[in-house]
Image (cartoon, helix red, strand yellow):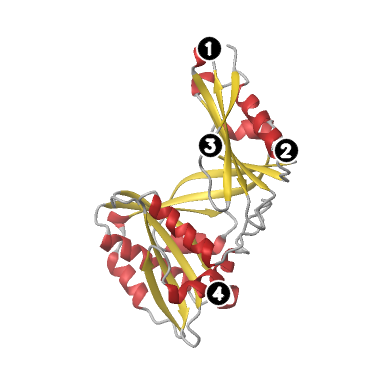
Amino acid sequence: MSTRITALTDPDRTATSHRLAWLASGDGDVPVGSAFLRLFTSPGQAHLAELTLTVHPAERRRGVGARLLTAAVAAARAQGRRCVTAQADAASPGDPFLAAQGFRKVLTLRFVRLALASADRAVLADIVRQPHPGYRLESWSGCVPDALAETFAASRRAMDDMPMDDADHGRVVWDVDRVRAAARAVEKRGDLLHTVAAVSVPDGEIVGFTELVVPGDGRGDGQHYGTGVLPEHRGHGLARWMKAESIRHAAETHPDLDGLLTDTAESNRHMRAVNDALGYLPTHTSLLYQLDL
């Protein structure tokens, strides 16, 4: 089989990244694989490129993936990127492929799911009611209210020290414009964003948050986008408190929702313990690979 690699124009462009794309075609111009390279452009991550590569199962082990990878890596170098990352499920074909192509494993991610039918709402309500002296909960749907926008953007630094093991993740720089743009992106694709925040009572500042995205029709599975607490406010059970309220709200507001998904670095023992305590069960493990250029 002869394979042709064609560069495509990808319209997926955001305020913080854009993508390059390639299509692999076989005999008769039949598509057999594709590659997408996301180039981050925001300060703190402009050295990164993220690769997503797929080859049809019937066409694997014929060099298609290697040719797509060669095109993507060459483009990353031409764009001045320092490294390329790619993710593969453990024991999937992508796992040994990336290792054979010179990528090194830098992070192990554990994926878990909470089946809402088995969630004990009484227990969740009890967790939410438990007093946390000096703190209160706030929540909103969609874009953050104007009155909380500045403090919410500032609270995003809670994610700066999340365990990333050997991955060169860079640093995501958040401001009010980026917070609002992220919420608008969720809305644009038809999904629903709900945020629960922990607020310091003395000064009214947000010190922690958890975000959940639910499909627009309220069915299927929702996805947790991030949970973080500022370092100086950790140790008070705020993550569990916020996440319990997020689950409770989702179950009550979206009765047809099946479950909630989240992933956590294997080394993030604290967040894994929070998820375990709330009833999340393992689904699979994924590996992040990185190629240093």
Amino acid of disc 2: Ala
Q: Which residue is mark 2?
A: 78
Q: Secondary structure at mark 1?
A: helix
Q: In the drawing, what numbered circle is on residue 89?
A: none
Label 4 and label 1: CA atoms lie apart by 58 Å
Is 176 positioned to the left or the right of 105 in the image? left
* Residue nearer the viewer, 8 or 256: 8
Q: CA distance from mark 4 to mark 3?
A: 42 Å
Mark 2–mark 4 distance (CA, rounded to whole Å) = 42 Å
Using the image, determine if residue 157 lies above or below residue 78.
Answer: below
> What amino acid does circle 3 point to?
Asp
Sequence-wise, the earlier of marks 1 and 2 is 1
- Foreground disc of the pair 4, 1: 1
Residue 279: x, y in percent? 39, 59
Q: Earlier in the sequence, mark 2 or mark 3?
A: 3
Mark 1 — residue? Answer: 27
N-terminal of the two: label 4 or label 1? 1
For disc 4, the marked residue is: 234
Whether residue 39 appears in this view of the structure is yes
Query: Which residue has dot 3 on it?
Result: 10
